[in-house]
Image (cartoon, grey):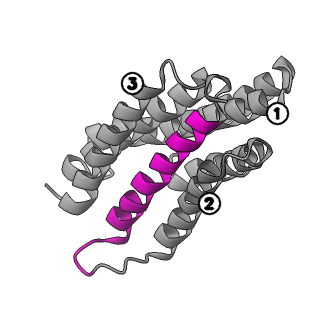
Amino acid sequence: MTEPDVALTDFALAIECAAFTIASVRRTRPAFVAVFALSAVASLLGGIVHGFASEADSPVYRVLWPSTVIAIVGAAAAMGVAAAAIFGWGPSARRAMLAIALALVAFVAWGHDDFYVAIAAYVPASVLLAAAFVTRRAWLGVFGLGLAMLAGALQQAGFSPIPRLTHNAFYHLLQMAALALLFVGARRESPEQR
């Protein structure tokens, strides 16, 4: 295994997101189910890449890494759709969000699979969903989205306070906490839970 701490924390994140996907099916909006399912896919693929195919010229990397970025873009689009539903925006707003996501997917498919594409999709969607959660007083969801953005900033800065964990593995640990808070926020916001 080439990057064991990153791969193992990615796999743990995939398991957590898979559990949240199953637990969300009847308890949250469908868009939240998609957020957790696509996050599980992204984490699983990312774990395989970091653990077993981290060389950019390998055929496995050339397939799995762009797929990882696309899954993150999909999760971000689902966050945007969830926010639009909370705000009560019509279908045209949701279609616009999906069109932006498809444009980013095409960008990745044309060979621009840098992680910055995932960030460009995830940050605005997180801000929009946090604003939507504020309107529902789903404060743990707001905090989780804030933690996710802080985690991303720390990852990009290469920061890890734990000597045996790389910045990517530390990012995954923070993401696990952030997604748990997002799950609670999604359940709190859900029309069935209010």
Residue type indicated by callout 2: Gly
Percent from the top left, x then y, of residue 24?
48, 26
Quadrant for residue 162, please give it.
Answer: bottom left
Label 2: state its secondary structure: helix
Name the residue that disc number 1 marks: 87
Question: Label 1 is placed on what type of residue?
Answer: Phe
Q: Is residue 90 left or right of residue 150?
A: right
Q: Is the C terminus in the top left, top right, bottom left or bottom right quadrant?
A: top right
In the image, 54 versus 124, the foreground residue is: 124
What residue do we see at 82% from left, 33% from top? 87
**Pointers 3 and 1 in contact (C-beta within 8 Å):** no
- Kind of element beneath mark 1: helix
Q: Amino acid at mark 3?
A: Ile
Residue occupied by mark 3: 22
Q: CA distance from mark 2 to mark 1?
A: 19 Å
Give the image location of residue 50, x and y in percent: 27, 53
* Helix, strand or loop: magenta stretch: helix
**Residue count near mark 2 (Cα–Cα under 10 Å), binned few <14, some 14–19, many ≥20:** some
Which residue lies under the disc numbered 2?
146
Instruction: Give, as a single range, the part of the protein colored magenta.
Output: 163-188
